[in-house]
Image (cartoon, rainbow, N blue to C red):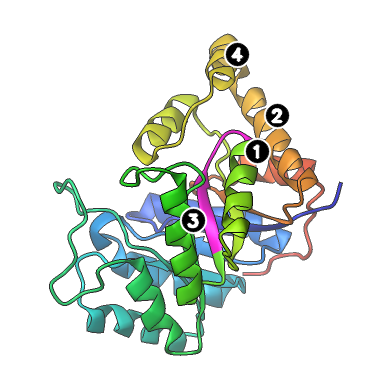
Amino acid sequence: MTTPAISFEFFPPKNLDQSFKLWETARALAPLGPDFVSVTYGAGGTTRQLTHEAVTALASHYGLNVAAHLTCVDATREETLQIVADYAAAGVHEIVALRGDAPQGQDRFTPHPNGFANSIELIEAIAARGDMTIRCGAYPEPHPESPDTAADVAWLKRKSDAGATSAITQFFFDADTFFRFRDQAERAGVTARILPGILPIQSWAGTRRFAERCGTSVPQWAEDAFAAAGKAGEAQLALDTCVKLCEELVAGGVDNLHFYTLNKPELVLKVCAALGVAAKSELVA
């Protein structure tokens, strides 16, 4: 089996304990030589400053190629583009450009009166700078606000045309879900490279709740398997399930896997080891 390239997603810490966890996760995973790592942005822009601090620290202290999440939520165009300029000044030249979720207490995203209306407008504005690599989101199953996958593919085509050169998918359970989406996107003329988002199952109950929120369908085989495994067998089943999914993706031509780490490196490390991803260097930080 071909050894895939990898990338990781982290979230910014909101307190001291979470800070230690992020840095421990970075220290554990950085030696694997990821293509890039991304840092999320809280709903409603709630972690804007924390995201900036985490991005710059990961880039400067751990030598990682960092992609900063950026959304259209609760900010003017000027404020948003100033964030991009600040990243560029700090040596960060990758952005994951997203519309973003509605702030807490709101049912739907509403653009700021002087802000970007959607991810396409954001991508176009960042692309106009000419100095940023732009990534975007993609949905192999319908986005909660989308009527069907065809609409999501059409929207991804617009994001690709606007300047996004790669797209990171929402997580999914079956490789065929990704392959169907990838094939539809290729037929639609999407030129952005599509990276599958992989969520190692740290907790089956938590993963099910997350799937419900983001529109990921939970297959019956997974329900049955985790019910049969129980708490005692959950960790091994989670590892086996994730490795199998990754192997199927690689066998189907995928050469880069993007892991949602939840700032917990242990399971991710085991999956990467099973895939033959070895440490490329000793980390000194």
Q: Secondary structure at mark 1?
A: helix
User: Does the image show residue 58?
Assistant: no
Pointer 3: what residue? 10
What amino acid is found at the position of numbered circle 1 in the picture?
Ala
Q: Whole-percent x and y of residue 88?
A: 45, 86
Question: How many callouts does the rendering have?
Answer: 4
Give the alpha-carbon distance from disc 3 to disc 2, as whole Å: 23 Å
- Range of magenta residues: 167-175
User: Is the residue 20 above or below the residue 189 in the image?
Assistant: above
> Viewer-proximal residue, 50 or 76?
76
Asked whether disc 3 touches disc 2, contact meaning CB atoms under 8 Å apart, the reply is no
**Label located before the other in sequence (4 or 1):** 1
- Tell us which disc is closer to us: 1 or 3: 1
Give the alpha-carbon distance from disc 3 to disc 4, as whole Å: 28 Å
Asked whether disc 2 touches disc 4, contact meaning CB atoms under 8 Å apart, the reply is no
- Left or right placement of residue 266 versus residue 58 in this view: right
Disc number for residue 175: 1
User: Does the image show residue 264?
Assistant: yes
Disc number for residue 229: 4
Instruction: Write down the quadrant of residue 98 in the picture.
Output: bottom left
Q: Whole-percent x and y of residue 152?
A: 43, 52
Disc number for residue 253: none
